[in-house]
Amino acid sequence: MSNALRQGSTWRGYRGLLALLLVAACVCTLAVWLYMSYLDSDITQTLVSQGELVSPQPRVFNIQCSEDYENYKRYPGCTPQRCGRAVTDSVVTREEAQVLRRLAERGLALAGSEGGASILDLHSGALSMGKQFVNIYRYFGDQIRDVITQEDLQLYRDVRGRIQAVIAETFGLNPTLMYLTKPTFFSRINSTAAKTQHDEYWHPHIDKVTYGSFDYTSLLYLSDYGSDFSGGRFVFMDSNGNQTVEPRTGRVSFFSSGSENLHRVEKVTWGTRYAITVSFTCDPAHGISDPALP
Ligand SMILES: O=C(O)CCC(=O)C(=O)O
Ligand SMILES: [Fe+2]
């Protein structure tokens, strides 16, 4: 074989190998990309499960505050310097949560949404009724005193105060510079199909955007994931995956309300889920007083 011929076939061999390598590299890249996007969409970690007891200290997960805070007015002693999320089972006892749950049951039994999500806001008096809301204080007048007692309201105030204290301690805030803000409400969720937008509790959202005044959100759970209901886990949606909190009677979950804590609630698939949303603002102008009977 002449030299030129030999060189030509060697070159063709190289070209073939190169093409093969290129195809292999492409396939590898595609596989890695598919795997990464699969992981991205499917990583769900349980932050705290229903069966655990987080006590005596809250379990705290620090996260970087979002840049949104640069656009908000700062209130020293309250505006988040540190952001994050935390869960504690030692701020509200199971017995206290059961008293509040019975209050929620009695209140919501007065009416309720036609769809699967009803709320009762003791501060404004708003109660879901059919496809809308009524004001319990106007609609039921003095009869409401049979449903909501002074002891219930005292318990709400106590619990609110303790939640405020644990949030302040966890995030290094001055509790006297945090104010309860609206809406503060009991929620009852079951698996009935939504009838109006008010029933669509499962959409991902940022509390600071949805509610405006919120700086710190807390949720007090009044029923148990797995035994009272299924679905209905709380989901923090992070860019690298989801983290869930499983509701447990008496469990308090709290977090900074900015976009670092995008979240949603899974659809409830059976049973009934009760919770209370208790939130705080740093802006005294958005503060409200504790719920009281008129
Ligand atoms: O009930 C929950 O777990 C969360 C509700 C919620 O995200 C909200 O009220 O903004
Ligand atoms: Fe929320």
Image: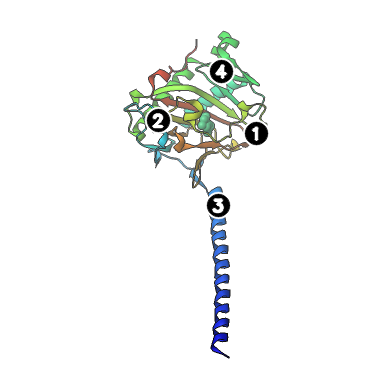
Residue at 46%, 29% (x, y): give it: 208
Query: Of the residues tagged 2 and 1, which is closer to the observer?
Result: 2
Disc 3 versus disc 4: distance between alpha carbons? Answer: 43 Å
Disc 2 versus disc 3: distance between alpha carbons? Answer: 32 Å
Mark 4 falls on what kind of element? strand
Q: Earlier in the sequence, mark 1 or mark 4?
A: 4
Amino acid type at circle 2 is Asn
User: Vertically, is 18 above or below 217?
Assistant: below
Mark 2 falls on what kind of element? helix
According to the picture, the residue beneath numbered tag 2 turns out to be: 71
Question: Visible in this render: residue 222?
Answer: no
Q: Earlier in the sequence, mark 2 or mark 3?
A: 3
According to the picture, the residue beneath numbered tag 1 turns out to be: 191
Mark 1 falls on what kind of element? loop
Q: Earlier in the sequence, mark 1 or mark 3?
A: 3
Identify the disc placed on residue 37.
3
Q: Earlier in the sequence, mark 3 or mark 4?
A: 3
User: Vertically, is 224 above or below 10?
Assistant: above
Query: Of the residues tagged 2 and 3, which is closer to the observer?
Result: 2
Answer with left or right where residue 84 lies relative to residue 31: left
Answer with left or right where residue 15 lies relative to residue 171: right
Toward the top, the furthest residue is 142
According to the picture, the residue beneath numbered tag 4 turns out to be: 126
